[in-house]
Image: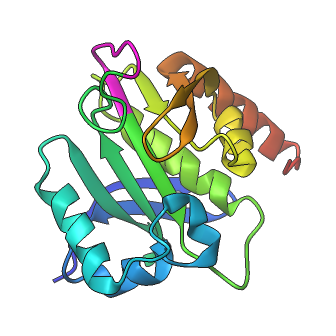
Amino acid sequence: MTPSPVFEHTDTRLGTFALRALDPAADAALLYGWVTHPKASFWMMQGADEAEVAAEYRRIHEHPHHEAFIGLHEGRPAFLAERYDPAVVELAGLYPARPGDVGMHFLCAPTDTPVHGFTLAVLTTVMEFCFADPAVRRVVVEPDVCNAGVHALNAAVGFEIVEQIAKPEKDAYLSICTRERFQAARTALAARAAQGVTR
C-alpha cells in the first residue's frame, strides 16, 4: 500500500505538490532511475546499482536524525526530498548549530519535458514542509560550490551563503534561510507571479 501524504502544498500555477514517506524497498527502482541519471550528478550516486541505492535509503530510513520522502506532483512521483538534523548529519562539527535548525536535500526527477518554474515550486514545497514544524527556525543546506543552478534557486527562496566549507566529498557553500527570510521571499515570489513575471 502506498503511504498517504504527510504534507501538501498548492502552487497557484502548477497545482498540488505533496510528500509521502519513502519506502526503501518499494521505491528502490524509482529512486535508482532518478539518482543515477546524468542530470543528478551532484547527488553523487552515479555509479551505484539498484541494491546500493536501496541500501542507502534503508540506512536513511533507519537513522534517528535523517528521513527521506517521495515528492508527488498531482499525485505522481516527481521528486525526492530529505530532511535531517544538521548538527548530527552532513554538517556535524562544520558550523555553529542552533536549536531549531533543520537540513534538507531535494532532487527533481529527470524528464524530457521540463516545465518552467517546476524546480522552484518543488523547492518551495520542501521549504514549506520544513517550516510547517513550528520548532524550525532555520533551514541549513550545503550545496556543492559548482552547482550554480541550485544557488540561484536557493537565493530565490531566501537562502544566504554564509561561507565556503570543506566536506569530505565536496567543497560546499554553507547556506542558511531563516523563517523570516523565507516568508519575505515567498511574498515576493507571489507578487511576481500575480504580475505574470516567471523569472
Q: Is 129 on the left or on the right of 52, as rendered?
A: right
Where residue 135 sits: x, y (%)?
27, 22
Q: Is residue 11 visible?
A: no
Depth order, front residue of 141/23:
141
Q: Is residue 25 visible?
A: yes
Depth order, front residue of 95/64:
95
Where residue 198 sits: x, y (%)?
84, 51
Q: Which colour scheme is used?
A: rainbow
User: Which residue is painted at 50% across and 19% down in the image?
Assistant: 178
List the single residue furthest toward the front: 168
User: Which residue is painted at 67% across and 29% down in the image?
Assistant: 185
User: Which residue is painted at 57% across and 38% down in the image?
Assistant: 171
Stretch of the chain drawn in magenta? 94-102
Q: What secondary structure prevails in the magenta region?
A: loop
Quarter occupied by residue 91: top left
Where residue 35 sits: x, y (%)?
47, 72
Image: 134 above or below 89: above
Image: 127 above or below 86: below
Quarter occupied by residue 159: top right
Number of numbered tags placed on the structure image? 0
Look at the image and say whether residue 99 sits in the magenta stretch.
yes
Look at the image and say whether residue 59 sits in the magenta stretch.
no
Depth order, front residue of 45/150:
45
User: Which residue is painted at 88% across and 50% down in the image?
Assistant: 196
Q: Quadrant of the N terminus?
A: bottom left
Where residue 10 sits: x, y (%)?
53, 55
Image: 64 above or below 48: above
Quarter occupied by residue 192: top right
